[in-house]
Amino acid sequence: MSNSTDQSLLSKLPSQNAEPLWTVMHSMVKPLPSPRAVPSIWRYNDIHALLLEAGRTGPAEKAERRVLMLVNPKLDAPFTTDTLYAGLQLINPGEVAPAHRHRSFAIRFIIEGSGAFTAVGGNKVYMEPGDLILTPKWQWHDHGHEGDAPMIWLDGLDLPLYHKLPVHFAEPYTEPSYPSKPVVDSPLRFPWAQMKAKLDASSANFSLEEYHDVATGGHISFTIGAMALRISKGSKISPKRDTCSFIFHVIEGHGKTTILGNDRSNGETVAWSKGDTFAVPAWNHITHDVATSGGDAYLFILTDKPLLENLDMYLLDSTQS
Ligand code: GTQ
């Protein structure tokens, strides 16, 4: 197309709400997956102090949820990665984080404290450190605390998805608490002792276990998946990259993870220890390296793999050696 034809054509397009693809082909159809999120780490020591401070400034009832969102430095809230949201929530003894329900799916991974519960759909599920608790979408849920020290957990939700699909909403319940009774064995609670035993059953230098929905045996939700990873002390592992993004939370141990961008540029190494949380964008290369001193490392992992599989967007980089 000659330049003058092009100019003449281009000038006629805006009034028709049309634009040429050929001038922007490369930015529209990129040669590599192009996450907007960047690698990032939130250190527990730092956030913990701020969360305790938030705990002194006002009641959970008023805040609805006392949460510090873990916001990716290249994105706005609620993006921790391009698809996953994480936040750290604190509840004080005697408080109630009032009942509501929303269209997003949520998980809690318990970090510290004892005596708090999440009530989901009428069932009070007590939480202990290392437990994973599910809150399926559209279930009435409130958090309460019968213990005597602040309780803190990691929230994980699929909230970022609703920016492209703006159909998310929440409803408050008429009372602070939804009527509920305690349950001992809830299909929504995955105790740490059971998961740790599975991870420890392997003598390989690492073991990876997915949390499965008790009823279906499949992923815990249509959008978010959860896994736990054990890496033996002194081991270095480089899982193949894929189209998933991840949020890692350190349950135990210390080590470092090198995260390389989709074209192996912008490398970053994050050193981590207990309580830290870090985000890994899609199609990034990762290498975990666990120190010889100290014990095995245990990591909790949130992933968008169910979402990508359900949409047939999952791809493992089979070219990686
Ligand atoms: O506990 O219900 O971190 O609704 C963000 C939104 C937690 C919750 C979050 C929520 C919740």
Image: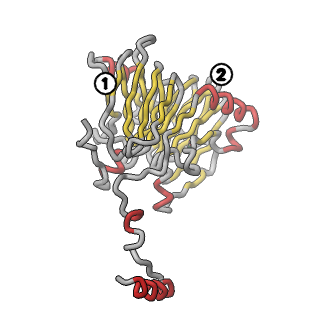
Vertical comparison of 201 with 106: above or below? above
Mark 2 vs ligand 1: CB below 8 Å? no
Q: Quadrant of residue 10?
A: bottom left
How packed mark 2 is, by other alpha carbons closer than 10 Å (few <14, some 14-19, many 20 or more), is: few
> Could you say which is closer to the camera, residue 321 or residue 6?
6
Quadrant location of the N terminus in the rendered image: bottom left
Q: Residue at x 36, y 23 (%)?
A: 230
Amino acid at dot 2: Asp
Q: Residue at x 37, y 45 (%)?
A: 283
Along the viewing direction, whichever of 147 and 53 lies nearer the viewer: 53
- The residue sitting at the front extreme is 3
Q: Quadrant of ligand 1?
A: top right
Position of 28 with respect to 321 (left or right) is right
Residue 146 in sight: no
Whole-percent x, y for residue 59 in the image: 72, 38
Q: Secondary structure at mark 1?
A: strand
Image spot of residue 138 (x, y percent): 47, 51
* Camera-nearest residue between 285 and 147: 285
Q: Amino acid at mark 1?
A: Ser
The local crowd at label 1, few if under 14, some if 14 to 19, many if 20 or more residues have their Cα within 10 Å, is some
Q: Position of residue 147 (x, y in %)?
A: 62, 23
Residue 148's disc is: 2
Q: Position of residue 104 (x, y in %)?
A: 48, 51
